[in-house]
Amino acid sequence: MTDTSTYAVIGAGPSGLAAARNLQRFGLPWTGYELADGVGGLWDIEAPRSTVYASAHLISSRTTTEFTEHPMPAGTPDYPSHRHLLDYFASFADRFDLRAGYRFGTEVAEVVPDGDRWVVRSTGPGGIPQEQTHAGVIIANGTLSEPNVPDLPGHFDGELFHTAAYKHGEVFAGKRVLVVGGGNSGCDIAVDAVHHAASVDISMRRGYHFVPKYVFGRPADTLNGGRPLPARIKQAVDTRLLRMFTGDPTRFGFPEPDHKLYESHPVVNSLILHHAGHGDVTVRPDLERLDGDGVVFRDGSRQAYDVVVLATGYRLHYPFVERSLLSWPEGSGAPSLYLQVASPAVDNLFVVGMVEAAGIGWQGRYEQAELVAAYLAAQRSAPERAATMRARASDRSSWPDLTGGYDYLGVERMAYYVNKDAYRRAVRAQTAELGVTP
């Protein structure tokens, strides 16, 4: 099937829905591809590649995360569960009639350029192969579906699995559990395990800053009303505030962070400190090797376990497109894209959702999608402005600084991390320069 005027949207999670909605707003035809049978992405716990677990909630608050044009309904908790969020995305899709544009139960196998067009090859329901030519492609399949599984030396006789395979705390009943990794998922799952396991340890390679969900009775990310502060001032003020509410986590055995606050994603979970303080969770050093019925840690100590959970994060996963088309440097954790969106290597290939920043929410992804739609619309109605943006995308020396003055930790998972305020200013400015409105 061929309709070269349409644009492909890969994914029906929040980023895919934002892309589809903005193409719709700008009057651009589109076709969506989604592996699952409905919308919601990873927030549909039953979806084929969902990595959400039963106790999962947002780590940012409702009002800082929701789409501006579609607020969450009255009565939604400050930190909604995956059930609330699946209902929310379903209501977003239904309000704007987005389901009709999607091919559900369809897995994209290959995206290849064909002159100035793009061929999308996919496998539909029943294993039927499909092929369609599009004017452009927006990759929006999320960032948290492909587990990052380290190659650990040794062998383990018990159960070993990544957090991507975890759903319910009952799997830990009566067992000695080790969680490897101290990020948000690792701490969540350690807290889950406390209520079921015989013992719970958490192995941490580096220290983190722990942020409570509530400060002075309000969601912590709403305190300054969204007003940006210079990086050094915000770090100094918020570090002191955190010490007032969480104390010094090293008292409980957590490593001292090797970075300042906001230079890596903080752990939004003070319950892990609560349980460590009560002796429910024991903090262990970095894991050195698996060792039969247990593990050996970097300090030479050894402990026996029944279950080892790898909370070692996720890798960007775009297996259907050549990495060179995304200007993905060898050894880097992420493609090098203009404003985290547009490929400098080829025209009309975009990624929406490949951005992480404290507090950026889904509205930040929506603004990415708005930029893409405005650019595609400008190609038709204001080609000279579209050409200016395209030239800028191709010239890395002209790219704006998106750090906001923060010195981000140089690890793979931070490869596409930005400062929310600097990033949204840059995206909005580029969209305004295109001069195209829905």
Image: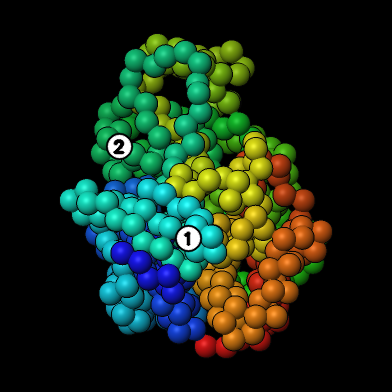
Residue marked by disc 1: 118
Residue placed at 57% from the left, 82% from the top? 380
Q: Position of residue 284 (x, y in %)?
A: 54, 27
Quadrant (top left/top right/bottom left/bottom right) for the N terminus: bottom left
Residue placed at 27% from the left, 51% from the top? 129
Q: Nearer the viewer, residue 430 or 161?
A: 430
* Image quadrant where residue 434 sits: bottom right
* Image quadrant where residue 221 sits: bottom right
Kindly identify the amino acid type of the residue bearing the numbered disc 2.
His
Helix, strand or loop at mark 1 = strand
Vertical relation: 355 (above or below) 91: above
Q: Position of residue 43 (x, y in %)?
A: 35, 58
Q: How far, Cα to Cα, is label 1 from label 2?
A: 51 Å
Vertical relation: 402 (above or below) 180: below
Q: Position of residue 274 (x, y in %)?
A: 49, 45
Residue marked by disc 2: 196
- Few, some or many C-alpha atoms within 10 Å of disc 2 (few <14, some 14-19, many ≥20)? some
Number of marks drawn: 2
Kindly identify the amino acid type of the residue bearing the numbered disc 1.
Trp
Residue 216 visible: no
- Few, some or many C-alpha atoms within 10 Å of disc 1 (few <14, some 14-19, many ≥20)? many
Q: Nearer the viewer, residue 304 or 310?
A: 310
Q: Position of residue 147 (x, y in %)?
A: 44, 39
